[in-house]
Image (tube, grey):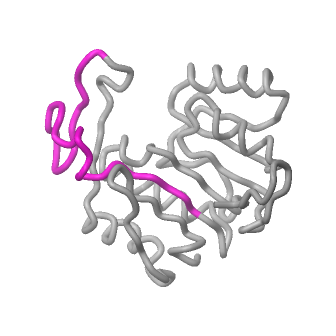
Amino acid sequence: FLRKRLTFDKYEELFSAKRVLDLGCGNGAVAAFLAKQGYEVCGIDLSAPAIEFGKKLLEHEKVKAELTVGNAAALPYKDGFFDVTVSYAVIDHLEPEAGKKAIHEVYRTLRGGGLFFLTLADTRINKFGEGKKVAHNTYLLEGDWYEAGAVQHYFDEEEIKAIIPLVFAASIVKCKFISVRFFSIDVQSFFEI
């Protein structure tokens, strides 16, 4: 979404960016990838152990990024600080109100013309409805796998159309829902801030 590979070592720049936020960076893998591509990267995650692991990964990969323990709904960055924010499978692990706050924070911390790439779990995936229901389309995941105990909200088209325009209201160009597993919203293609 930022660059298109033309050959093994040549890329076409699709979006001019310098500073990138990896929202919900977890183990730092995406932050490390983006840092290798030459971007100034900040990553934030609620999990202190994940941040520590990510710092070790960055050291191993010999790249730099600033990884911070923090809350997506209260970002510790200045207004307009980032050119791009990426969020892979994060907002859907927040309770709906916290997810709305996180999207507002993304908008606040993106520069005008910035890009927001996000993936959200969709009500059409096979895991929808598994776990203990705690709210509309929201479940507490159960079982013996790594996400047990996590909140999982599954978005439908109406929710996406309601939550994103609240923040990016004056700037919607178009909105597409992509793939069976995730909705992906790429602000460069779908929203101009």
Residue 88 vs residue 149, the one in the foreground:
88
Residue 76 rendering spot, x and y as whole percentages: 62, 47
The residue lying at 64 percent from left, 20 percent from top is 53
The residue lying at 38 percent from left, 57 percent from top is 179
Q: In the rendered view, would you say 44 is above or below 170? A: above
User: Hey, which quadrant is residue 180 in on the image?
Assistant: bottom left
Residue 164 rendering spot, x and y as whole percentages: 40, 68
User: Hey, which quadrant is residue 187 in on the image?
Assistant: bottom right
Residue 144 vs residue 83, the one in the foreground:
144
In the displayed orientation, state which residue is furthest to the top: 144
Q: In the rendered view, would you say 40 is above or below 161? A: above
Residue 130 rendering spot, x and y as whole percentages: 18, 34
- On screen, residue 177 versus residue 103, left or right, reads left
Residue 7 rendering spot, x and y as whole percentages: 81, 55
Q: How many labels does the image show?
A: 0
- Where is the C terminus found, in terms of image quarters? bottom right
The residue lying at 21 percent from left, 43 percent from top is 128
- Where is the N terminus found, in terms of image quarters? bottom right
- On screen, residue 36 versus residue 111, left or right, reads right
Q: Give the range drawn in magenta.
A: 116-144
Q: Is residue 120 magenta?
A: yes
- On screen, residue 63 versus residue 42, left or right, reads right
Q: Does the magenta stretch include residue 105?
A: no
